[in-house]
Image (spheres, grey):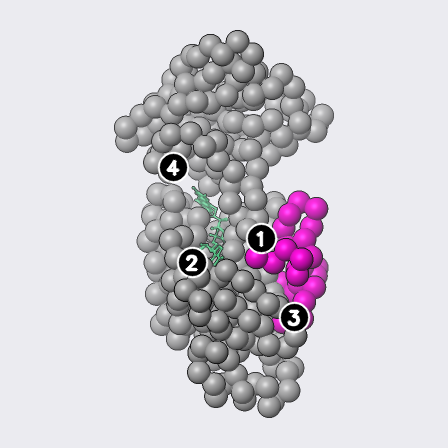
Amino acid sequence: MREIIIIGSGPAGYTAAIYAARANLRPLLIASSVEAGGELMKTTEVENYPGFADGIQGPDLMMAMQAQAERFGTEIVLDDVTKLELDGEVKRVTLGNGDVYEALAVIFATGSAYRKLGIDDEDRMSGHGVSWCATCDGFFFRQKTIAVVGGGDSAMEEATFLTRFAEKVYVIHRKDSLRASKTMQDRAFNDPKIEFLWNKEVVHIYGDELVTGIGVMDTVDGTESTIDLSGLFIAIGADPRTHLVHGQLDLNPDGTIAVAGRSSRTNITGVFAAGDVIDPTYRQAVTAAGSGTVAALDAEHYLAGLPKELLAKAESQSVTV
Ligand SMILES: Cc1cc2nc3c(=O)[nH]c(=O)nc-3n(C[C@H](O)[C@H](O)[C@H](O)COP(=O)(O)OP(=O)(O)OC[C@H]3O[C@@H](n4cnc5c(N)ncnc54)[C@H](O)[C@@H]3O)c2cc1C
């Protein structure tokens, strides 16, 4: 049995691991089989993570976080968690390869998946003109023509924000009216840099190294046309990765895991959650890292209050059940 198991290897998971390892809690981090490193593995330049004046490539940042977590004794397993039994003092974590681990505390940091359009070249062009985050990437599109896909509040917010940088912002929506709130709609309608393309769906992304244009289809008459642009921001929502804890952890109406106040404490004692999986709003690497810190400190505090015999059992036993 372990003192603590961390699930997820994004900024939240690795930061939690750094803190837990430095507190001598010998964390085991389950990093996932194919998606180790989390969302930043899918991008190129990260310019807003503090400490890197010249920016850093997303994968390099995540490898540095991994190395820092390992330096203090974090053990990392490249597999997926397939089952979680969180009730009771001892939590059970089952992996894809069948191994079962036990721990007194669990930090759940599985992130959130941006919804995709599901078209060719969307993944290939991620970080090369296709983006899911205006805050992260807007700066790269100064004086450029770009498009935002979506019709909700976040699409309007992204489009309005992006007019600070871009020369022109198309908002592409597959219907003829928006889901966004009246205030957000008005703000977008009144912005001279924004042009709405109604009843349109993006069906192609063009470009070799960088995005050079998109193909859109009219959802009413099926005709296709091409738009020259350099950036495509996809703002059609995100799904927190919570399927493993459905029926165990309380969720908010927006699908994120519910935590108590500013803490990382979930409704189950000894289970903590951090990063984008609890955050419907900010969803940045640095906020996820901060949230991982909170979770590690909460878990450390929780473990310190457990009976000494139980802790001794965790310290003396080997990794696998
Ligand atoms: C293309 C792109 C570019 C971005 N650019 C920036 C940027 O420039 N600056 C910035 O601040 N933010 C950026 N972001 C946002 C940032 O990446 C996220 O806010 C941040 O990664 C969230 O961290 P996290 O640790 O909560 O989750 P994630 O990074 O999503 O990590 C979650 C981890 O959990 C793992 N996991 C999930 N399910 C399981 C399971 N069952 N078993 C084991 N492991 C599991 C995943 O594999 C992953 O390793 C970008 C996001 C994207 C998609």
Q: Earlier in the sequence, mark 2 or mark 1?
A: 2
For residue 275, which quarter of the picture? Answer: bottom right
The residue pinned by badge 1 equals: 243
Label 4 CB less than 8 angstroms from ligand 1? no
Query: What residue is at 52 percent from the left and 27 percent from the top?
Result: 149
Q: Position of residue 297 (x, y in %)?
A: 57, 70
Camera-side residue of 43 and 200: 200
Query: What residue is at 42 percent from the left and 12 percent from the top?
Result: 225
The residue pinned by badge 3 equals: 87
Question: Which of the labelled discs sits on residue 123, or is there none?
Answer: 4
The answer to whether residue 64 shows anywhere in this view is yes
Q: Earlier in the sequence, mark 4 or mark 2?
A: 2
Which amino acid does the dot numbered 3 rest on? Answer: Asp
Which amino acid does the dot numbered 4 rest on? Answer: Asp
Query: What residue is at 51 percent from the left and 41 percent from the top?
Result: 114
Q: Nearer the viewer, mark 2 or mark 1?
A: 1
Q: In what element is the residue under mark 1? A: helix
Q: Nearer the viewer, mark 4 or mark 3?
A: 3
The residue pinned by badge 2 equals: 32
Label 2 CB less than 8 angstroms from ligand 1? yes
Real-space CA distance between mark 3 and mark 2, rounded to the nearest whole angstrom: 23 Å
